Image (cartoon, helix red, strand yellow):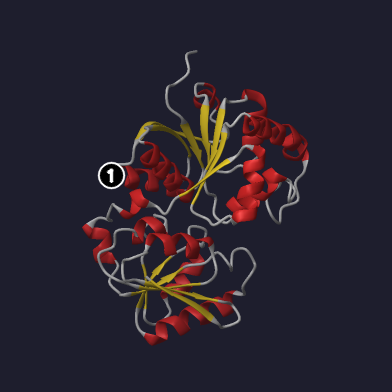
Amino acid sequence: MPKAVGPVAWVESPLQLIGAAEWAHARSTRVDLAGRLAVQVEQTAAELNARGAMFGEQAGFYGIPWGMLRSHDHWLVGDGFSGQFRLAVAVLRPRRLTFLDDGLNAVAFADALTGARAFQRPGVVERGLTRRVAPFALDAVRLRAARGAVDLFTAFPLGEARAEALADLGVTTARHDFPWLRGTRPSDDLQARMRHARVILGSAGVVDGRMPRADYLAWVADQAREEPASYLPHRREPEGLLDDVGRVPGIDVVRTGLPIEAVLAGDARPREIVTLPSSAAVTLRRILAGTGSVLREHERRGTTREAAR
């Protein structure tokens, strides 16, 4: 089978999908898309397509998209820790690899490549095939790095020491601040639904067991007590929790089905955005630069870090 000319992006989350669109814009290269069959990924793909993302052939998958991967020499990979990626890269051995952001895991993945930490997702105990294939996958990635055929394309700060360690392996690091997404705008309908200048970003803290449900709802109520707010759910918040949030006085839950980066990028109205610590605090600071919006990151112990944009 002849190889495709351009790369394929293998993405499993909305942020990974945005990373693929940004890479395509930065390289002026059309990217084929193998996306996980999930509602949020499909909705985000439709939104980015409507905004003019440089995507070519697009197909949805459960599991490993063997056919699309086999037909491309260059993969843009959303989750380098994935057991499915490990198996695919060990078997198919593509010529070139570019790793996109998977939230703050981008930093942990960089450390895994350099050997500063184990090659496994933080906080996860791996077993079975996922664990057994890890050394082969890591060898495959490092071999390509030694040939100058591995890149990290990230919006997250890696630090000078980490970047130097990656460079010693042959890994090229490219930073971006979402120039393509910032140059687009949400639909008029979406902007109209965001009725309030104050925006509260939903958190996965309750789902992940990092914050009691009652404490989280109390935090939301505290934020809405100052003035009414639009609440943008986290993609993993369950409907039962969102129902409770929607009953908090002053809260308007806005279900967009889109990542917050896509909702707020290009927004014509300056906002006050409130969030608990998350990778979104990093991405939004870059997306909102120069817009007049203010992002306030609340620590769970009650302190606040503020950044005016």
Q: Position of residue 95 (x, y in %)?
A: 57, 25
Amino acid on which disc 1 is placed: Ala
The residue drawn where x is 26% and y is 63% is: 191
279 or 242: nearer the eye?
A: 279
Percent x, y of residue 302: 56, 83
Q: Residue furthest top?
A: 1
Answer yes or no: is residue 184 visible: yes
* Left or right: 129, with 107 as reference point: right
Left or right: residue 297 compared with residue 57: right
Front residue of 81/227: it is 81
Q: Which residue is mark 1?
A: 50
Question: Front-most of 293 and 276?
Answer: 293
As drawn, 244 above or below 39: below
Residue drawn at x 41%, y 86% as measured from the top left: 225
Q: For the residue carrying disc 1, how many other residues have a C-alpha within 10 Å: few (<14), some (14-19), or many (20+)? A: few
Look at 45% across and 49% down and name the residue there: 14
Q: Residue at x 70, y 36 (%)?
A: 138
The x, y position of residue 120, in whole percent, is: 71, 47
